[in-house]
Amino acid sequence: MTKVNVVKDIDLIKSIEVYDHAGFAGHGDDIVCAGISTIIFGGLNALIEFGLSEESVEVSEATININLNEVENIQVVVQTIIIQLQTIQESYPDYIDIQIH
């Protein structure tokens, strides 16, 4: 199951961490992972275009961590990412878990 941890401070989203494989299907055939990856990397490209530095992003084999402390004018993009992930969660609740705290 893919896990998404969102950290908020009042109304501002401060960070998003996405990790683990959804497990819907095998490598190369997992539509849930493909959807999540598309949302995250497309959103990340938009965040960088709007001013997020590449140093605020950590990408490893199974984890993506986006630190949003430096830029406040990108919250609409971040909220869009979360809404899109929640849409996947509605259709595939056994394969993605989103925690907002």
Image (cartoon, helix red, strand yellow):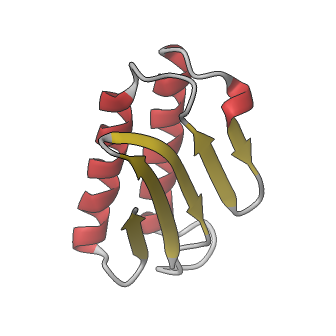
The residue most toward the bottom is 94
Q: Number of numbered discs present? A: 0
Whether 69 is drawn above or below 23: the answer is above
- Lateral position of residue 58 relative to residue 79, left or right: right
- Lateral position of residue 60 relative to residue 44, left or right: right
- x and y percentages locating residue 84 in the rendered image: 29, 50
Whether 88 is drawn above or below 40: the answer is below
Which residue is depicted at the point 47% across and 80% down? 24
State the quadrant of the C terminus: bottom left
- x and y percentages locating residue 12 in the rendered image: 37, 38
- Lateral position of residue 27 relative to residue 45, left or right: right
Whether 3 is drawn above or below 93: the answer is above
Which residue is depicted at the point 77% across and 54% down? 60
Which residue is depicted at the point 42% across and 55% down? 35
Q: Quadrant of residue 52?
A: top right
Which residue is depicted at the point 63% across and 71% down? 27
| Front in this rendered view, residue 15 or 80 | 15
- x and y percentages locating residue 15 in the rendered image: 52, 46
- Lateral position of residue 101 relative to residue 5, left or right: left
